[in-house]
Amino acid sequence: EKLGPIEAIIHASGLLRDARIEKKSAQAMKEVLQTKVDGLINLIRGTLGDPIKVVAAWSSWSARFGNIGQIDYAAANELVNRLCGEVERLHPEARAVSIMWSPWEDSDMARSIPPIVRQGLEAEGVLFVPTKEGMERFVGELLGGRGEVLIGLEMPLEERTLLSRQTLSLESHPMLSDHRLKDKAILPFASVIEDMLEASRGLRGDAVVAVHGVELCHGIQIDPSVELMLEARSRRFSHSPECGHIELNARHADEQPKLAYRAQLLTDAELPEPIALQGEVLGLPMSIQTYYEEHAFHGPLMQSVSRVLELGTNHIIGLLKPSKPASWSSLEKRSSWLADPLLLDGAFQLVSYWLWALHQVTAFPTRVEHYVQWGSVPTGPVRCVIAGRDEGDGVFSGNIDFYDEHEQRYAAMRGVRAQVFSRAEKASASSTSSSAEIPPERYRMEQFEEVTSLLQRFEMAEKAGLRNPFFVQHHGVARDTSVVAGREMINFSSYNYLGFSGDPEVSAQAKEAIDHYGTSVSASRVASGERPFHTELEAELAQLHGVDASLVFTAGFMTNESVIGHVIGEGDLIVHDALAHSSILQGAVMSGAKRRPFPHNDVKALDAMLSQIRGNFRRCCIAIEGVYSMDGDIAELPGFMALREKHKCLLFVDEAHSIGVLGANGRGISEHFGVDPTGVDFWMGTLSKAFASCGGYIAASRPVVEYLRYTTPALVFSAGMSPANAAAALASVRKMREEPQRVQQLQQRARFFLERARTAGIDVGMSDGSAVVPCIVGHSMKCLSLSERLAQRGINVQPIVYPAVEDSASRLRFFISSLHSEEQLGFTVDALAEELRTLA
């Protein structure tokens, strides 16, 4: 009655109850269909007496193409498409359009899609619709569209990509050591904006540089170093203006890359209106020098504010000093900045002064909606005008204008958001938060972000039609074959390298040990858990490695973690291969020592590193592996032994995948290269691979082993190795010495598989001479699919996907056994090659 008759219908409701068909309930499917279909039917019926001119329905690309887990949602949207075809019969004057969208970039649904699933969708041509482009397209269809319109599955007319990488460290970028939160050197938000502006100009060549929606996803800690990977992509479509995005990923040596910042390329870079200041002008409660000394987290090199000119209830004005690229890094080749990160950070420092002066809080920036710049960055002082307000819940927002020395406004920042991370302490009891104010995601582990994220990845993979390949139950002995779900398969996911697990003699020795000693020694060895088989096994392992003594632990991972963490400490340095196993990295973390990775298997790079920094530390330990379990390549042991002598270091060699595999008699990498084993300080090995048991050990000189025996926490405070495990390992070591042909057959089978795979054009990466042969697939979804296809052909091989490795390094990993026949290996390579061609 107020607004007159209804002339348009927009039907945009929908409900998701995604699941594979066998898990869908009739009620859930009914809810999905009713929301979409009955909703539109009721709207049409309810407006039969109104002069309807247009009906616009939001449909989905799944209506046309289907989508795994969405049989009901796809059907509901296709019914909406068909119903729109009936609208003009019921409303002869009306025009009907049904828009089949792909996901919107900024929607909660799109954000919930894990990167691995999103990449799979994009590979199928599903484009994620930017919000601005989507709104413009919707308005256009509302005003003139008719029939079924498909949006988001067409390829762009033009696409440009810019990629860049750089490594930051406090040595190469000393200025960054003066930007610390809670004593951790953190990359400034302002530096990210500078890099994104450079990428925008490099990609598009605009005279006016701008970025939109720069958002902090994960802070970047510098110490000791970090690799930054920036990708900027621009797309132009036939139906909309150019659009694009920028992503900055960060990777530390022992981690997978993490998305740190993201932004959109701004196509409309109009000059916003100058800030209009409001509110009362206040006196300055402190000088900027006092603020820097007592409240800021910026050291002298990062202090950009030279003077606070005016402070108000809702604004602050100050003078900023610029910087030169060379002041940030001696490696910097640019002679001038595009925006100058020190000026940008200086604006954030002014915001921090205002926040502390008025609210007694410290905050850091988390988002910038727009940054637009029209001219070159000034070389002289910059006047910065900031207007801000309190949004509540620890969030502040504001706008910033930059003026050059001639009072010309040359840049503007809009929609700046800052998040409080500390508050001034107050004497009153009310300043202490009660436990009732702590949200459940901080104390209910099932609501922890990392927990829900993992479960979400499993759910999305299931919706994409991929079975979970992990924790699958196997039956029987893990030999050349394994029984999975009642089906015998060729097995490449177990490292029973020499076939001793399941060997009758080895099993008999384990059973006899149980009969004589029971199933557990029931105490730590230093207390009353010592047994004769412990001493015998350690003597055999020492002889195997050609050193004085050895010490057995109950787990291989724990051996590395505990021994490295125990022997090395504060004031020391651990340098480890960039591809070192997680157990080595965890031991390094536990030690409290400084930790530096060196490029994989690169003796020259390590030499150069140690030449620069070895003298700064008390002790230094070089940690490498004999065979790298992800890649199957062999360490350049003689070179590392030479560096041990040259730089006066300890050398720690993890032989988990090389003992029993390398050397004519299986004595490992020292036999492989023919070097003196006493030139290594710590030989570490595991008993779960070639030796058909479970546990780890250290082989070394007798004084070192005696020290570890009485002081290593993992031995002193842990029960001794069980009788069955020790007896099985002891029998396996002796059997390998008596039957070296097993080692030779393993090496022959591994060569056969590797050479045949290379001949078939399979990417086996760096594998060379070991029993580990990867197949590099390069896409997590493709890798999971390949593993499943091979399983259907009777081949069991595990996928290694993100986050265990980078998505581009996703792989299948084949462990070769002496038990594998050439027929099994040949069949597997042929099947692998065929399936790779099918998935290409």
Image (spheres, rainbow, N blue to C red):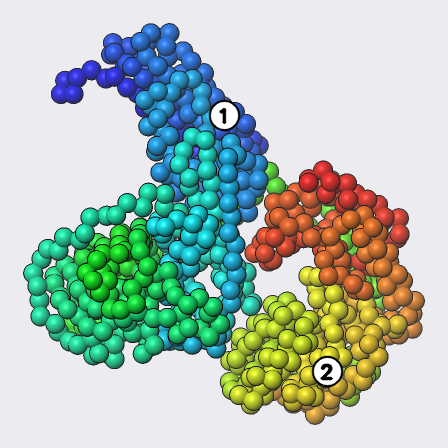
Residue sitting at x 48%, y 21% = 78
Q: Position of residue 519 (x, y in %)?
A: 72, 70
Residue 175 is left or right of residue 69, and the answer is left
Q: Position of residue 232 (x, y in %)?
A: 47, 50
Q: Quadrant of residue 720?
A: bottom right
One can see residue 106 in this view? yes
Q: Amino acid at mark 2?
A: Met
Q: Say few, some or many: other residues with alpha carbon within 10 Å of mark 2 (under 14 / 14 to 19 / 20 or more).
A: many
- Towards the viewer: 558 or 580: 580
- Residue denoted by label 1: 63
Q: Secondary structure at mark 2?
A: helix
Q: Quadrant of residue 180?
A: bottom left
Q: Say few, some or many: other residues with alpha carbon within 10 Å of mark 1 (under 14 / 14 to 19 / 20 or more).
A: many
Q: Are marks 2 and 1 in contact (CB under 8 Å)?
A: no
Residue sitting at x 77%, y 44% = 833
Residue sitting at x 17%, y 53% = 275
> Can you say whether 783 is above or below 139 in the image?
below
> Can you say whether 754 is above or below 585 in the image?
above
Q: Secondary structure at mark 1?
A: helix
One can see residue 493 in this view? no
- Residue denoted by label 2: 641
